[in-house]
Image: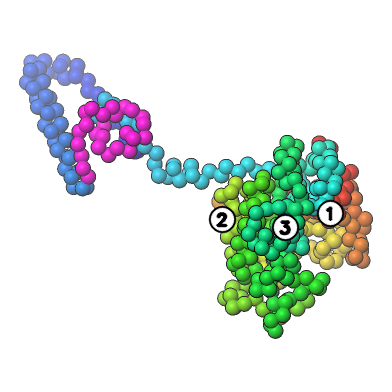
Amino acid sequence: MRRRKKSDMYIDYRKSYRRRGRNRNSTLIGIITVLILATVFGIGTYYAIRIKAGGEYRLNKNRDISDNSEENADDPNIIPTPQVTVAPTVEPEVEQIIEEVDPRVPVRARGIYVTSRAIMDRRDELIEIADTTEINTMVIDVKDDNGRITFNMDSEMARNIGATTNTISDIADLLKLLKEKEIYPIARIVAFKDPYLAEQRHDLAIKNKDGSLYRDNNGECWINPYEKEVWDYLIEVSTKAAEVGFMEIQFDYIRFSTGKGMSEAYFGPLAEEKSKEDIIIEFTKYAYEKLKPLGVFVSADVYGTIISSDIDAGLVGQNYVELAKHLDYICPMIYPSHFAEGNYGVEYPDLEPYKIVRKVLTASRNKLDDIPEGEHRAIVRPWLQDFTATWIKNYQVYGGLQVREQIVGVYGVGYREWLLWNASCNYSVDGLYSD
């Protein structure tokens, strides 16, 4: 109920008496008569309006309308009087705002990647890094690069195909410890690179045009992102991860393979209607809508090159701006060694980690400015390099100095979160600030 603005209802009768003392009685009678007529007219008008609107009405003098209970607030039969203050009802707009309040509490993450084996065999060592440095986050494998589930979860499809390994045999104790240590736990879910599921369910795998299974350069099969059943499997695994205590779901390999022969692969009839980018965006939106109500944040790893290359974006199906509209965090992998010589005007990117990181993230900021002010936009949380890329020609050994240069590059652009990648979980602690 909207509050009406009060009108000035006070009259200075003293002026009237001084000016018209001789006609005091007649004036008084006139005023009383006017008030009576006004009252009768007002009540008649009120009822006429109620009847015209089709609403029922009755006077309930026994109801205590000063009661602030919800029952009274919504009762259409109460007719308020000037002597009593009626508790205002909450307007629909306010109720809608209350329903949309996000109960999730964000963490400014500075993290490291941790395999399921490492968190079991080297737990104390990894916890020590978080205890003594600025690291406050661990990205832990839940569904790994091989498609195996790392703890014993009750997932129907994982159970049917035998995907669970239970490598992390004490998942509840682990999540409890991380909480005690104030370490933010992120569940890494490898999405469409799933050779295990593809070998078990050929109907869900990417195929060649002759019907055989597509295999990448390493001989591994991939799952077809156009298959809705695959989506539901990923959501099921993610839901179970949320239930045990992970606070964020991070999808990796949320893309198509870039291996040889992909241009000749067959994805089914739906691929004739929707592009690779279309289907990856649809999955991301679907996953976000399913997982956010569980109280977890949702993020995804993307190629760093898609920020400025439409060709790369089309090949892997990752549209940087559109994905950022349906994620809480977008995590571009901007490892200096992964950029070709001369990219962004940097002759040898691996040799200049600060410069390449700063240039790529500046491009990221400019790209995401395409999203109108006020619309949802994911926070950028890049992956940084903490490994030595011996397979490229112009490389350097990466250690604490190179790690710190990348972190400074992140901060220089105005971003405040980052993650370190080392497949063996061996991190350059000397490049991290002490706690």
Q: Position of residue 18 (x, y in %)?
A: 16, 15
Q: Nearer the viewer, residue 364 or 158?
A: 158
**Can you see residue 298?**
no
Q: Which mark is residue 289?
A: 2
Work out how far the residue at label 2 is from the one at label 1, CA to CA, in angstroms: 31 Å
Residue at left offset 23%, top offset 27%: 62
Q: Amino acid at mark 1?
A: Asn
Disc 1 element:
loop
Please, what is the three-letter code of the amino acid marked with disc 2?
Glu
Tally of numbered discs: 3
Instruction: Identify the mark at residue 164; answer none if there is no mark.
Output: 3
The answer to whether the residues at label 2 and label 1 have Cβ atoms under 8 Å apart is no
Q: Is residue 41 above or below residue 225?
A: above
Q: Earlier in the sequence, mark 3 or mark 1?
A: 3
- Upstream in sequence: badge 2 or badge 1: 2
Please name the amino acid that badge 3 sits on: Thr
Query: In the figure, is residue 56 to the left or right of 183?
Result: left
**What residue is disc 1 on?**
422
- In 3D space, how far apart are the residues under numbered discs 3 and 2 (Cα atoms)? 26 Å
Dot 1, how many residues are within 10 Å of its Cα: few (below 14), some (14-19), or many (20+)? some
> Is tag 3's residue or tag 2's residue first in the polypeptide sequence?
3
Residue 36 vs residue 419: left or right? left
Residue 17 percent coordinates (x, y): 15, 16
Kindly identify the residue that appears in the image at 21 percent across and 42 percent down.
Answer: 56
The x, y position of residue 414, in whole percent, is 72, 48
Secondary-structure class at tag 3: loop
Q: Which mark is residue 240?
A: none
Q: Is any part of residue 19 visible from this angle?
A: yes
Q: Which residues are magenta?
A: 55-80
Residue 278 percent coordinates (x, y): 60, 68
